[in-house]
Image: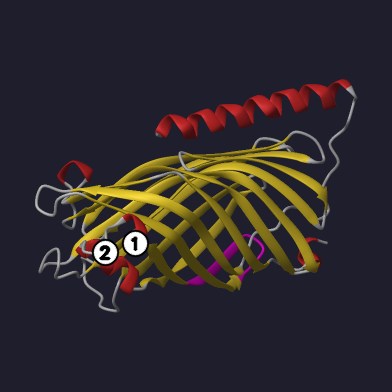
Amino acid sequence: MAKYFWLMCLMVIKTIILFGQNLEEDNVELEADIIPYRPRIAEITFNNLYDYKMSSTSENMGEAETEIERDTQMKIRLGAPIIMKEKTMFGVQLKYDRHSFLLDYDNGGQDYGLYNHIERQKFTSLGGRFLLRRDLAENKNVTIIAGAELKSDGIKWTNKSAKYYLMGSYEVALNERTKIGGGLALAYTLSAPQIYPFFSYEHKINKNWTLDLYLPKTAALRYKVSNKFYITGSAEVKGWRYAIRNTDVSDEVLTLRKSDIYAGLSLEHEIHDWLWLGFDAGFTFNLRNYLAEPGDRRRDALIELNPQNAPFARFGLFIVPPRRFYK
């Protein structure tokens, strides 16, 4: 399924080239943005996947099928700066996620222990992170992010239910239209070590169109209708992991993991200066979904889950820095 992500990236880039060629032919000049696209510092978001069938296979638990009528995630973020100087910003962000499932057993699965468990339990992500950004020169900066969070079906902090991570990035503004950067991310997630490099690229094609890449996770093309309204088409890899305690499957703590490609369209509109409304819709393509012992990968899965691709809708309110910070 990874090919779908790269296909989306290529489609976005091809679209950008076509738009760029047309606009350059019309001699449309880039205008400096007095108010740029502003980052989210706090938000509450509801993400829903609808009506997708899921099958499972396991040597010990056998096979089963069911239908996920609704897969709902509530996400809350609250960020605040602690230090804001001319070249240095230090801040903190708190995180709370609540994840629940509603199953339709008309297609079976009512006697399958894992299905019953995920419908009965609410899954939680709870934690925080610190961010330090330092400008090294007029066009260069370095950012360090460190954090920890609980990811489980119960409030009990152990190495099998916690995530610790550290990320460092370096960004250079090549000119007023283009920024490029890269970095390295380290994590220890529910007893599984992770390390991966990432690459960022932001390019203003003209005063309205911007390409944002954060690879290998996101490719997006954003259109500024006005300083109060943005439309974005994107392809993004998103996923989750939770520690679960299900005695019907095992007496030990296990890890339930899922990752998807989200491809869709996002609308963001200002309500009042710093308060915005967002709505996203599109389709998800599943990459992996399995239950395993902590630290194990898909090849060692105890239960292999095979959810169908599904439509999604996301609705949220979020807070951005007020305009006066940019004037």
Kindly report the secondary structure that dominates the magenta region of the rendered protein.
strand
The answer to whether marks 1 and 2 mark residues whose Cβ atoms lie closer than 8 Å is yes
Q: Reading the chain from its start, which is encountered first: label 1 or label 2?
A: 1
Which secondary structure, mark 2? Answer: loop
Residue at image coords 36%, 67%: 148
Residue at image coords 69%, 66%: 320
Left or right: residue 45 compared with residue 28: left
Residue at image coords 32%, 62%: 164
Q: Is 255 rendered above or below residue 123?
A: above
Left or right: residue 293 compared with residue 228: left
Residue 290: mark? none
Residue 105: mark? 1
Quadrant for the C terminus, please.
Answer: bottom right
Q: Nearer the viewer, residue 80 or 229?
A: 229
Left or right: residue 279 compared with residue 153: right
Range of the magenta residues?
Answer: 84-95
Dot 1 surroundings within 10 Å: few (below 14), some, or many (20 or more)?
some
User: Visible in this render: residue 187?
Assistant: no
Q: Is 129 rendered above or below residue 65?
A: below
Point out residue 261 in the picture as x, y percentages from the top left corner. 47, 43
Point out residue 302 in the picture as x, y percentages from the top left corner. 15, 51
Q: Quarter of the image holding residue 227?
A: bottom right
Which secondary structure, mark 1? Answer: helix
Q: Which residue is mark 2?
A: 110
Colouring mode (rainbow / by chain / secondary structure / one colour): secondary structure
Point out residue 125 in the picture as x, y percentages from the top left corner. 39, 69
| Amino acid identity at mark 1 | Tyr
